Structures are given as structure tokens and as C-alpha cells.
Amino acid sequence: MTLRLKAYVALTAAVATALLATHVSGAVEQRWPHILAWLVICLVSETMWSKSISGDATWSLAATAGLSSVALWGPEAGMWISGLSTIVADLFVQHKPAVRAAFNGSQIVITSWLSALVFAALGGRAALPIASGPATLDRALSTSLVMPFAAMIVVYFGLNRAMVSLAVAWSSGTESPRSWWRVLREDWLYMAKLEVDAASFLLVPLMVISFTAVGYPGVLLFYAPLFMLFQSDRRFNELQRAHEENVRMATMAVKGEIAASIGHDLNNALVGITGPAQLILRALGRKNYDDLERHTNKILEQSKVVAEFAKGLSDYTRKEVHVEPMDLNGLLMTTIEFIKGDKRFRAVEWEIELDPALPEFKADVGQIQSVFLNLFVNAADAMGTQQSRRAIQVRTRLDSPGGSARVDIADSGPGIRPEHLPRMFEFMFTTKPKGHGFGLSNSQRAIANHGGQISVQSVPGEGAHFTILLPVRGRGPLS
């Protein structure tokens, strides 16, 4: 706690103590049963609290009850009710440190007293039919309460938020200091918080009218549903936070498994490098150069494996999409012509049916082409050297005008085993003996980056069928 913060808290407490000391007799002697009753109402309201976004401050619907008591019972009784209820709630409901409870209670005393003075000065107290029993508010006088209520709320909101924000700003650590204005803006002056504040403040005149018309039963009927709704909302938020924590823990567990798997694969690859390297060193020591070329080639082969592994990891985490005009049919044909000469595609029959109605749209050509390459290579590897017909079907069509471009890629291979089908796009899942499991997961990420979808269907013995849907306007249509 800095010196200036200590001085600020002490000054606030001194001013509040002086106000309470000079008004104690009148406040207690005037309708003390009502003071006790509204202390209970305010304490119940103080249980309806939540933390601000930064976590350094709290807000509650206690302002509704506090301002209502200020309007009904005047500056003296009002500041006693608000101040005492705040201190008790901070200590025993929110379990705040004594220093914070003392400061909060002190600043509430000051803001309540000034707000009540403004309300009374503008004729608010005179217009209210405050008596020992219920009374009817004269409609002719009701319009005269608009300005007093509005002014009281503005004074309370401005002074309370300013004083609390200054304390929070001066209590922030040196590692992440926040200015007074930044605290005010981040903790109080954002739309969601302003909407909550407006709702709680607009309830004040309604609560006052309920009390003046029906008495304490009116307060109960008016406030009880709000209390139940607020408690329900708090329970929902707690469940939501618990759910998010469970998801975070599950995500961390998955990341741990992935890290362990990556470490295992990298270690295997490094063994394939360090082993030949040690053999080279021994051979050099014996001046035996016969096997140098063979050992060096092994090192190069394993280096390529590590490089491919690193590229797969990099592609999986890539989110940037560099869009450019793309002719989907043209890209497919270019990709097919590019790979036809590879030995694994020899004797593969291509069945191509492209929809000429596909428009040119914007996409990351490199990412989309890598998806096609991966699917074609997977199809060829799946068919292997089977003696039956080896064929890859490629079809495109426009699902609906201005909708999605659909690409179907199917092969005549053995298909996918049913137990493997749900895991085909899982990161690092592979059915290939020397595969890394990056291909389909990277393909799914690339399609998702474009706002599209990729799915797979397969019947054992009848090949695999991949379907890609790319929104024509997903990355901005060409003008």
C-alpha cells in the first residue's frame, strides 16, 4: 500500500467519520425502526454482487437499495444505512480486507450524503408522501421527481466511480500500473457495465414508489424476483467458469499428449542422425572412408524426415490466409497435371467432371492446392499396388448460386476402417507406417481458415470419398 493511497484512505475515512459524528443523534432518533429495516434490505442487496472485468473492483445492486433509502429517509439516515450495510457486507459477505471495507463504507457515506442533499435541494423529499404507513403519490407531484432522481443518480454515479477508480489506480502494482482514467474506463465505462448500472439506477424510483404505496410488502414483491434472477445468473456464471476451467484442463492434457508424441518422434529421427554421425567419426578416426557415403545419405534422409515433420507442425499452426483470385477448376487441373508424372500415380485412371459454372473467387491458392495434393497422394498410397482398378474421381459443382463450391475426391482403394473414420482429421493420427498424421489435420485447418468444411465417407472395400465445401464469398468475391 503506497503512501499516497494510505493518505487517500485515511482522508476519506476522516471525512466520513466527521459526517456520521455530526449527524448521529438526528439519524438514530428519527424513525430508527426504518433504519434497521433498510439496513437489512441493503445487506440482502449486497449479496447480489459480482466482480468487474479486471477483477480489481466489484459492483452490486446495493446501489438500488442504498439510493432508495437516501431518497426516503434523507441525508442523515441515508448515509448511516448505506455506510453500515457496505462495511458489514464487505467484511462478512465478500470477505474483503478491513482496509478496503473501511474505504468502501467511507466513500459510500460521502456519496450518499451528497446525493441526498442534491435530491432534497431539488424538491425530491418534499414531493414524496413519506409517512408511517402507505400513501399514494400525487400524480401532479410525480413529474417533479424526475429531476431530483436524475440529479441524485448522476451525483452518486460520478462521485462513487471516481473515488473507487482512484483507489484502484493507486493500488495497482508497478509491473502493470493503470491510470485513474484507464481504471474508470476499463472497470466502469464499458457498454455492458453501463447497461447494468442504468438498470439498477432506474429501479430506484420504482422501489421508492413501491414503498410509499404499499410499504415493506411492496419492497418485498418488487425486489424478491430481482434477487432470485440475480442469484440464478451468478450460479450460471459459476457453472460457466467451471466448464471453461474443465475445458482448459482438458486442452492442457491434450497438448501434453501431443508434446510427448512429438518428442518421441523427434527423438527417433535424431537417433537416425546421431547414429550414422558417430559411425562417420569412428571411420574418420580409423581413416576408413568406404562407408562414408552410405552414412551421409542416412543422415540426409533423416534430416528430410525432420524437415517434413517441422513443416507439418508449422502448417498446422498457420492461420494467415493470403487471398488472391482463384479458378478452382483450373487449380485442380494444374495440380493433377503436376502429379501425374509421379511414379505412385502411374496406372491411375482419372475421372474428372468439372462444373463450368463455378465462379472465380478469392482464396489462398497455396493452402487449397496443398489440400488437393494431400488428398491425391493419400488416395494413391491407399490404392498402393493393388491388382484391381486404380482410379481417382474428381468432381466439382456449385451447390447454389453464390453459395458454396463443392469438390468431391474419391478413390477405388480399400477404404477406411470404421474405427478409424471418426479420427481421420485428428492431429497426428495416421494409419501409415511412416506417416506423421499432419496431412488431413492440416487440410482441415486450411479449409476452416477459408470458412469451409471437409468431410469423409467410406465403406470398407469401396474406397474413401472426401467432400470439400468452400464458400464462394467466404474470403470476399471478386468485383
Image (cartoon, rainbow, N blue to C red):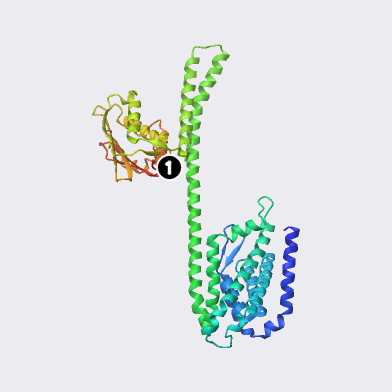
Identity, as a three-letter code, of the amino acid under mark 1: Asn
Residue 154 location (% of width, % of height): 61, 69
Residue 199 location (% of width, % of height): 52, 69
Image vertical order of residue 296 relative to residue 334, above or below: above
Q: Nearer the viewer, residue 449 or 85?
A: 449
Image vertical order of residue 103 relative to residue 250, above or below: below
Q: Residues within 10 Å of mark 1 (few under 14, many from 20)?
A: some
Q: Nearer the viewer, residue 435 or 62?
A: 62
Res. 187 visible in picture = yes
Q: Which residue is mark 1?
A: 449
- Residue at the extreme front: 479
Q: How many labels were placed on the picture?
A: 1
The quadrant in which the N terminus is found is bottom right
- Residue at the extreme left: 388
Q: Nearer the viewer, residue 67 or 477?
A: 477
The quadrant in which the C terminus is found is top left
Residue 196 location (% of width, % of height): 53, 66
